[in-house]
Amino acid sequence: MKCLILAAGYATRLYPLTENFPKPLLEVKGKTILDWLIDDIDTLNVIDEYIVISNHKFYSHFENWAKTKSVSITVLDDGTTSNENRLGAVIDIKFAVDTLKLSDDLLILAGDNVLDFSLKKFIGYSLNKNSSCVMRYFESDINRLKKSGVAQIGDNDLLLSLEEKPENPKSNWCTPPFYFYKKEDISRLDSAVSDGCGTDAPGSLVGWMCKNSVVYSMEMPGKRYDIGSLESYNNIKESYSGIIE
């Protein structure tokens, strides 16, 4: 299994902090956000390569960081230089798959989220289901739902639909940016894009996939902290207490 980490964004809401430095490499309690994610996952010994998709502007930062890690990390440069010419998450996934000719099951993560729970639980769930899987959490705030990927769930955690940033949310289930795709579903990427799948938000691919394959949704066992402003970053630096196994 490969782990694909989406880290090609520009985090403009965090300027000036991220104007010349990538958000996933910001430190929280002495470790970068990426270190928290990878150090947790790697204890399972199921990932044989980590792939970080960067933009051209921050590529050297990720390359230097990768040299400090003992695990196998490939850093890709998607060639973009600003928020205005970014490719979008789905095209970045396709870029990595095509460039490296990936034919493995993929764990795909947004590299800028801090968690208080171990992703090992999600990996175990996905392997047990032997199917593509996502997570979900309950959100009561209608305004937050309108800015999220909103899922409809059927029996036995079956994902029925996922809509990005809906004007009229059909449920209170939000889908965070952590996905497990079987290699058979990853092989459908070209079909998804040619079929008109949205390409900016990573959840758009899930929305297409659950209509063309079997996808399950695990309820998130803890909290996700999205660092979206300088205030939220300062708060998490003070309050974060690590991953609860």
Image (spheres, helix red, strand yellow):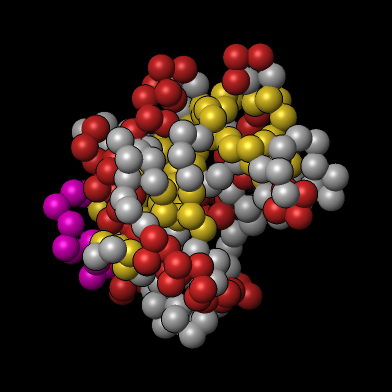
Q: In the image shown, does 237 or 14 lie closer to the viewer?
A: 237
Left or right of 223 in this view: 161: right
- The count of marks equals 0
Which residue appears at 68% of the width and 25% of the height? 153
Q: Position of residue 80 (x, y in %)?
A: 51, 72
Left or right of 173 in this view: 89: left
Which residue appears at 60% of the width and 20% of the height? 157
Q: Considering only vertical position in the picture, is 77 above or below 142?
A: below
User: What is the residue that sits farthest to the front in this orientation?
Assistant: 239
Which residue appears at 63% of the width and 32% of the height? 209
Magenta stretch holds residue 65: yes
Residue segment shown in magenta: 63-72
Q: In the image shown, does 109 or 228 lie closer to the viewer?
A: 228
Quarter of the rendering occupied by the C terminus: top left
Q: Is residue 70 visible?
A: yes
Q: In the image shown, does 98 or 182 lie closer to the viewer?
A: 182
Q: Is residue 6 visible?
A: no
User: What is the residue that sits farthest to the right in this orientation?
Assistant: 168
Magenta stretch holds residue 183: no
Q: Position of residue 158 (x, y in %)?
A: 63, 20
Prevalent SS, magenta region = loop
Left or right of 231 in this view: 214: right
Q: Considering only vertical position in the picture, is 120 above or below 202?
A: above
Q: Position of residue 173 (x, y in %)?
A: 67, 36
User: What is the residue that sits farthest to the bottom in this orientation?
Assistant: 16
